Image (cartoon, rainbow, N blue to C red):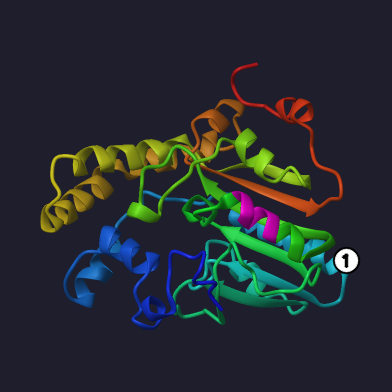
Amino acid sequence: MLNEERSVFSAQEVVARRGIKNLLRENFAPAGAPLKQRFFDALPKLSKNRKADEMFRRFASLLRDDAPHSRVLVIGGGVLGAGMQQLVDAPHIELIDSDVYFGPRTRLICDATDLPFDDMSLDGVVIQAVLGNVMDPERAVAEIWRVLRPGGLVYVETAFMQQVYLGPYDLTRYSLVGLRRMFRWFDEVASGTQGGPGMAAAWAYQYLLWSFTSAPRARAWLRLFARCTGFWLVALDRFLIDKPAALDAASGHFFLGRRSDRPLSDRELVATYRGGFQ
């Protein structure tokens, strides 16, 4: 259900199984046999989402308090995101997994800027690691607000101090205050850092190494080297994730909110800052 007049994707591309997820695999997955992929998957990771499990438990609990049955749209849900098993296992939640490509969980092909749902028809929306890859994020957030019922929940995660990972489809980064302004038509339930400064440093280290070459084989070996020598940086986030200054150097942020009929003013917005520059 793509609006091809506005979307950068076409139905023909989707049918051909091309899209941003394939680009992601080309950038981060090693070329070659599945055995090589399994070897890379067994290595220490340079990414760690430290809040998704907690936030999705809270998301599910809030929906259970609101209604015995909830419909939740997942934007960019072709594969199961970090922490999402909490919603899959919740018997009171019906997930509608959408994406711009045919993934293992895709039920609906659509663009985030043109959601094919009636006004106020959904109880929740999840948009995890997607908003920075949308051509018109303001319109996408307006669409989320439109399809949510009054008091409906949104959970969003976005990159901040993180390098480009989706090539031409990688567009925007948000500080926590910037993310809060994007969702100013929502009342905050919780917000903070989901990937800390240690993860940001680990990514920067890998991309520093990658800067020396564009050859796929060399980049694969440098990725291997980075993961074997830089994984300890990610472990630091276990101690840093809730520190105020971590908000200013985070790899990524999250926001959990409820649909509101009153926007947060810019004067109120700047008062929400709680980072290291106090």
**Looking at the picture, how far across and down is residue 73, in whole percent?**
66, 70
Q: Is residue 157 above or below residue 65?
A: above
Q: Which residues are magenta?
A: 138-143
Q: Is residue 78 left or right of residue 242?
A: left
Secondary element at image label 1: helix
Image quadrant assignment for residue 267 = top right
Q: Nearer the viewer, residue 210 or 19?
A: 19
Check disc 1 and give the amino acid type.
Asp
Apparent side of residue 249 relative to residue 259 in the rendered image (left or right): left
Query: As drawn, is 156 to the left or to the right of 40?
Result: right
Please give the name of the residue rendered at 34% of the width and 74% of the height, measured from the top-left corner. 18
- Is residue 9 found inside the magenta-colored segment of the image? no
Q: Residue 148 placed where, x, y %?
A: 77, 64
Residue carrying label 1? 66
Corner quadrant of residue 262:
top right
Q: Residue at x 73, y 60 (%)?
A: 59
- Magenta stretch encompasses residue 142: yes
**Residue extending furthest toward the front:** 5
| Horizontal relation, residue 136 to residue 190: left or right | left
- 20 above or below 230? below
- Residue at x 61%, y 66% (from the top left corner): 114
